[in-house]
Amino acid sequence: MQIKYEPLEAGARHNAPRMIVVHSMGEFILDPHPIHATDFLAKLGYSAHVLVAPNADIYICREDDQGAYHARGYNTNSLGIEFLVEGHHTYNTFIETIKSPFVSDEQLAAGIDAVRSWVRAHDIPRDKVVRHSDISPGRKVDPGAGFPWDNFLDEVMK
């Protein structure tokens, strides 16, 4: 595992984290040629605080006290983490892939550590660690049925 700094400019200047939003997205997006998730987010004017690659590398894109454009309506009071889905994806292949288990053990452990550190640093309660689909039902489906949500949440809160 390596920690990489990949600053993304999109986001508010200030953030007061009171919740954590868990997402997933393709590691590489076919646009039409493969583009890494960080470059894709930058191209669209979006961001997240942290991305976790399948090999457990951590990409730090925004500081905790900076807002990130990751969840409409929650960009200045939350921290966003993206679990990257291995491979090259269109939107349709991504949606299909997250229906089945897709997170490596190393990736899950790295994400648990990152979110646990946020929970402790910002005193965030269990009910404020949410999936993107929880706060945008009918519009968003990530991190998907293939994400081990209950295990993840239990481990984060230990």
Image: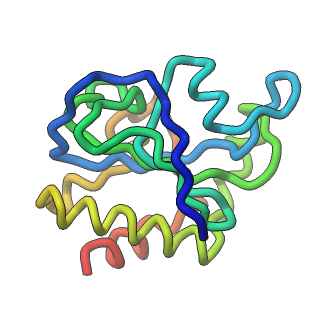
Q: How many labels does the image show?
A: 0
Query: Residue 27: x and y, percent?
Result: 70, 46
In this figure, which colouring scheme has been used for the structure?
rainbow
Q: Nearer the viewer, residue 141 or 57?
A: 57
Name the residue: 67% across, 62% down. 54
Q: Is residue 87 left or right of residue 79?
A: right
Query: Residue 41: x and y, percent?
Result: 58, 28
113 vs 67: above or below: below
Name the residue: 29% across, 30% down. 67
Name the residue: 78% across, 39% down. 89
Query: Residue 143: x and y, percent?
Result: 52, 50
Residue most extreme to the bottom? 158
Residue most extreme to the front? 5
Quadrant of the frame with the C terminus:
bottom left
Name the residue: 19% across, 43% down. 17
Q: In this view, does 27 lie to the left or right of 8?
A: right
51 vs 135: above or below: below
Q: Which of 125 and 34 is in front in this view?
A: 34
Quadrant of the frame with the N terminus:
bottom right
Q: Nearer the viewer, residue 104 or 47?
A: 47
Residue most extreme to the right? 33
Query: Residue 80: x and y, percent?
Result: 38, 44
73 vs 27: above or below: above
Q: Is residue 93 left or right of residue 37?
A: right
87 vs 78: above or below: below
